[in-house]
Image (tube, rainbow, N blue to C red):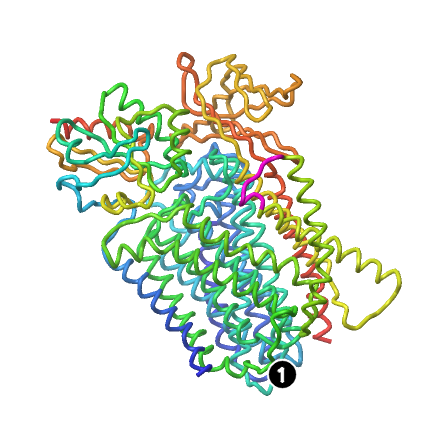
Amino acid sequence: MKKKILISPIILFFLILLVFFYLLIIDRNPSELPSVLINKKVPTFEAKSLLENKTFISSNEFGNETTLVNFFATWCKPCLDEHPYLKKLSNEKGLKIIGINYKDDSKRAIKWLEKLGNPYSSVLVDPNARLGIDWGVYGLPETFIINSNAVIKYRLVGPITKKNYDAFVLKVKQVEK
Amino acid sequence: MIPSLGNFTLWLSLLFAIFQFLISHKKNFYSVLQFNKIAVNGLLFCSLVSFFSLMYCHIISDFSVINVFQNSHTTKPLLYKISGVWGSHEGSMLLWILVLTIFNYFIFKLYNQKNIIFISKTLETQAIITIGFLLFIILTSNPFDRMTSSHTNGLGFNPLLQDPALAIHPPLLYIGYVGFSAAFSFSVAAMSIDVEEKIPWYSYLKPFVLAAWIFLSAGIAFGSIWAYYELGWGGWWFWDPVENASFMPWLLGTALVHSLITVEKRKSLQSWVLLLSILSFLLSVIGTFLVRSGILTSVHTFALDPARGIYILTFVALLGGYSLILFGFKSKNFLNRHYFSFFSREGSILVNNIIMIVVCASVFLGTIYPLLIEIFSNNKISVGEPYFNSVTIPIMIPAILVMGMGPMLSWGKVDVIGILTKSLPSILLAAVISSIFFWIYRSYNMLGLAGIILAFWIISNILLTTIQQLIVKNKEVTQENLPKYSIGMIIAHLGVALLILGITGSSIWQKEKIIRMKVNDETSIHNYNIVFKGISEVTGPNYVALQGNFWVYNNKKNIITKLKPENRFYPVTNNSTTEASIHTNLARDLYVVLGDGDINEGWIVRIYYNPLVIWIWIGAFAIFSGGLFSMKNNLKKLKRLSI
């Protein structure tokens, strides 16, 4: 019996390698993350609001104007870099941005927004990544552009930065048309 | 001319490696010795020439070489031209080969009349590994490939990598990874040779494992220092896949360093050590695979190429398949019925090993979990800091508790009451020091409490055992059963205690302030007042920078320091980096980062008050030096073996 255990490392090892091989062979580019949600209606969901004592219902909120949905967290350092650009989008472009606070400590998130300013029209809490799974979130931050018919048109993985800000604004304009 | 020489010697290295593989199974002592002498020295010489040829190309900025063209620029300072050799994927693989051949040379030096078959078998395995990597570099990523068109300047480089800590980080890390290749080869050799031939294979293994572990520790420490200074995020560890790739072999290495002591002293756990040696090297190569194949994205932006991924994976499959099948069949020869009690030195080492394995498995799972989920559910998820922190910290706590006790226990004996009375003084001492600490800092938090108490628990144990040892020495008593403490162990364990102190302080009591500041604005963080005195433009060798000038005052209005964080812009690559400015003392770091902004609106300034950070680096240095002491002793032991 005991001697049979000795061959278990090799079995485990090859199982793991099989996974890696499969990932290499299938055509996939990790930095380009196509979303199955593109051109689909936004998922319906409800969530607690971070700052107000009320429940957010998705069907009431989308569909009137172009809206951004931004997943962020205080533990996500790139989110910090992204923050000024979200504010710019909200203040200068007048865009409605819905923030989803992903797997985070609510107290810290409130403090964070107090310090940095709040670009979001509503902030929802997603403590156990339930919404993140619905939206297929891969890594923080992620931003979705939703058009006025409540259809998801674009997904950006990673922060909006100095580099891609203009390109992102262009995408928003395309969606608005 | 020089690039051709480099390329030629690279091919020649391959020939020497194949030669080494072919002749190593010969049985005649003198012919094996003579032939291997040629192979090993030739291999070392060729890879040295090849490596320095590439370095030469980088130094003189020979842009006819694609690798130089893509990764260098004439404006780069000399130090970074040199470190640029291993800054790219191709160059770093060449460094890997060089380190491999150096270890190969050291293994060859161990030859003597008694161990001929064992060392030959080791060199044979080492040759397979070398051939594998040489073929990889020649087929998929030759650093000496030439350009068809000519260019007067290079494409530049990643300015984040232009940093002294990062210049030295890869070589240290590679010594670590490659050191495990020696452990791998020794283990394979130990399992391949006849059992009747009693070779103390573990004594050969130990200095190499120690070397690998020491340099891996140092490499990881320098990587963290770089992340702390250069990324400007106020932290020093981010659970990035690349960090995990170095952390996992380190965990197994830690387990290995400890269980090897048991094998040496008590001859138990032999098959376990064999498995660990194999796994540490396989994990090192899998780590390389994860980073270089691009199936995971991370801050390390090596060029992505699926062909490379497939090559490395095939190679890992061959090495792993061969060694683990060998393990499956042969390791039963190393099993023994030598059971020991939980409350013994072996018991504590076993606990250490189990915990290291569990942590390693958890980190591995977290690292590849997004990939697994993607395959089975088509969903993409991210695993970040919350997972790793909440999983690894609770598992580590018992390991640290045992770490304080372990060295006081005797080999093989059970004496629970004796242990309790023995550890009573350290429990008391730890309680007293911790209370003093909290009386001074007046900050209470469950995790903080646990971290500080654990740190002082180890420190108390070390203090008491050292004192005990000194008394015994003075009295010149030689009791047989009194455990002996090696100076290396004492220093390294002290290092871990300091490391825990630093980690706890900097993660639990960190204060962070992010504000927009105009010139002459003032802000305060933890008893310090910080005044934004002005902003100026400075020019460096290949960048221009905005430099903020912050004066820091304490609560008695005395000036403490002037901090000058920079926001650098590198015109060649059109990149900017932030240089944090940090004032360090033994109690805390003050860390200022200059963000975006302009003269009218003001600048976004991030200020961190990071308690006890310096103890992380001091701790890492102590672990490193403790390892060095221990290695010195083990080399002596090995020398005695060969006489």
Which residue: 22% across, 24% down? A95
Which residue bears the numbered disc 1? B198
Of B346 and B570, nearer the camera is B346
**Image x and y of residue B212, in percent:** 57, 59
Is B231 situated left or right of B440 in this image? left
Q: How many marks?
A: 1
Which residue: 59% across, 68% down? B259
Which quarter of the picture shows residue A144? top left
Which quarter of the picture shows residue B596? top left
**Image x and y of residue A128, in percent:** 33, 46
Is B70 situated left or right of B504 in this image? left
Of A87 and B257, nearer the camera is A87
Q: Secondary structure at mark 1?
A: loop
Which residue: 40% across, 14% down? B601
Residue A128 visible in this rendered orientation of the protein:
yes
Magenta-colored span: B442-449
Q: Does A173 lie within the magenta span?
A: no
Residue B109 visible in this rendered orientation of the protein:
no
**Image x and y of residue B566, in percent:** 50, 25
In this view, B493 is above or below B449: below
